[in-house]
Amino acid sequence: MSNYKTWLANIGWVVLEIVVFTVMSGILLLIFNLLFTQLGWLQPDTSLSENFSRPYRLLLVEYLPLLLIVTFTTYLTHTLIFKFPFSQTGIQSDNILPQFGWGWLIGTSIVTIGFLVLFSFKLIEFRSFNWNAWLLLGFLLFFIVQSAGEEVIMRGFLLPAIEARFGTVVALILSSSVFAIAHYFNPNANWIGITNIFLGGLLMGILFIQFRNIWTPIGLHASWNFIQASFFDFEVSGFDVYSLIQFEETGMDIMTG
């Protein structure tokens, strides 16, 4: 009976921590959005697909503020309010570049191997090169910041919040499930993509647990998005963005995604 009460109490604490994090992040985001709208930097009627054609604007006006807000709110919630060590979040100043580099290498390798398999079996066909250094750099910076924001939420905040009460395995599965569900409403989402996102969440969670450092999963996440979207011309989260190499998918969707 005592274990059952402890289990229920832990559920309550996890839910409460998530609610506090969500409410505080939402309030701060609302304040920033209102401010940017008043300054004319943010047009609420602009579609996300239009924004994806302007990576620097998307980076500076939306995703960089989001990254700063969720990082601050993670510290506020997990450490100041719920009294857990901030080191649990993996947001550390040590070995940033080596850890990020490992993640980048893993993500690049996975996507490149997948691309080479598709190309070898003639499931995609080369069309042209589209060199634009300004856009290539813009999307590189954008995907790093965008991925960092998602990783702070999913691996920096959510995984440790669950792990502190229910252990590593439960935290890994639940955080990866939330990560997949969060992408369910992306354009053209299907069971193949959602399953892959869940598996990607597992991999990034395992790296986080292994190194206890947020930079490795950020590197993997950022390289996964950048290499597939702005290098090999695959859609990312259902959106088609600038790509250095133009390819056309000619195989079955179950093979090409």
Image (cartoon, rainbow, N blue to C red):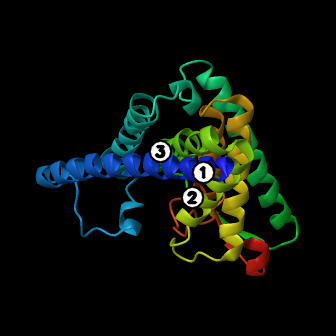
Q: Quadrant of the C terminus?
A: bottom right
The residue tagged 1 is 5
Q: Position of residue 245 (x, y in %)?
A: 63, 59
Q: Nearer the viewer, residue 101 or 209?
A: 209
Residue 149's label in the rendered image is: 3
Q: Position of residue 13 (x, y in %)?
A: 49, 46
| Front label number (1 vs 2) | 1
Q: Quadrant of residue 193?
A: bottom right
Question: Disc 1 marks which amino acid?
Answer: Lys
Q: Secondary structure at mark 1?
A: helix
**Residues at badges 3 and 2 in contact (C-beta under 8 Å)?**
no
Farthest front residue? 1
Q: CA distance from mark 3 to mark 1?
A: 35 Å
Mark 1 neighbour density, 10 Å: few (under 14) some (14–19) many (20 or more):
few
Whether residue 129 can be seen here: no
Q: Secondary structure at mark 3?
A: helix
Q: Secondary structure at mark 2?
A: loop
Name above or below for residue 99 compared with residue 200: above
Q: Position of residue 49 (x, y in %)?
A: 41, 68
The residue tagged 2 is 243
Whether residue 90 can be seen here: yes
> What residue is at 67 percent from the left and 52 percent from the top?
1
